[in-house]
Amino acid sequence: MPSKRARAEDPEEEEEEVAKRSKAQVRVKVISGGQTGADLAGLRAARDLGLETGGFAAAGFWNEDGSQPQLGGEFGLVETKGSYVHRTKLNVDESTCTVAFLVATRGSGTSKTVGYALTGKWSDGFQSSAQGCYCHRPVLVIHGEEMKDAEACASTLKSWLEGLYGGKLTLNVAGHRTSLAKRLGLDFDYDQRCYDIVKLALKPEDESSLEPEHPSNVGSEVAGEG
């Protein structure tokens, strides 16, 4: 029977143990800009899981539903004195990584967010950052066609987060505002799907099977740019 020392020196076992420790150590805080749609869906999913939330909001806590100062108390958002663009850059810069739910492409606020994460410049971007390649901040892009399968997207996001860092990380959730998502003519509820994906991805593994949940308030309380 091999000794404990021999087993510990087995490269495959050691790699597996490192992976397990890294996986167990990942703790996530979720932030966003407080816009309707993906932003608020991500914050609500995190809140419903008991995770820490936060982020930077535009001046006046403004989104497409108007001034929403209650977002400060509800999700820990901090009001900035700047525009949507200013607070979007802050959320990318102050997070470990960004997940962007992208349906509309060129010229949308979400594509600009992706471009900023990739390059540090306010320009269009459409693809995830490549692992091991230089970028301003890591970004995972989940496209509209992919969003039809919530569990597959959640699995992708979960694996991506686990591959980035051990310890605590801050995930910035970005995407389209509710009104734009509705104009795109999707055959699924965009706000709800963002909520489901984030919640499934961050749900502790010891909870029961990955079943999307459908709270009635997602996308209905507050709906900005994007």
Image (cartoon, rainbow, N blue to C red):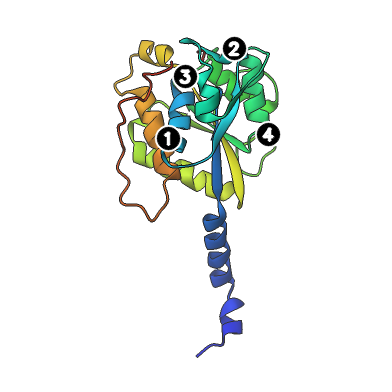
Look at mark 4 in the image and give the residue it sits on.
135
How crowded is the residue under tag 2: few (<14 C-alpha within 10 Å), some, or many (20+)? some
* Of the two numbered discs 4 and 1 in the rendering, the one whose residue sits closer to the viewer: 1
Mark 3: amino acid: His
Kindly identify the amino acid type of the residue bearing the numbered disc 1: Ala
**Which tag is nearer the camera, tag 2 or tag 1?**
2
* SS at mark 2 in the image: helix
Residue 211 picture quarter: top left
| Residue at x-position 41% and y-position 11% | 179
Q: Which residue is mark 1?
A: 45
- The amino acid marked with disc number 2 is Gly
Residue furthest to the bottom: 1
For residue 7, above or below residue 217: below
Say which of 74 and 34 sits in front: 74
Mark drawn on residue 201: none
Tag 3, which secondary structure? loop
Horizontal placement of 121 versus 143: left or right?
right
Residue at screen point 39% across, 42% down: 200
Give me the C-alpha separation between circle 2 and circle 1. 24 Å
- Left/right placement of residue 223 relative to residue 20 reads left
Residue 176 shows which numbered tag?
3
Asked where in the image residue 94 lies, by quadrant, the reply is top right
Residue behind mark 2: 60
The mark that comes first in sequence, 2 or 4, is 2
Mark 3 or mark 4: whose residue is earlier in sequence? 4
- Spatial CA distance of label 3 from label 4 is 22 Å
As rendered, which of 181 and 69 lies closer to the eye? Answer: 69
Residue drawn where x is 55% and y is 67% of the image:
17
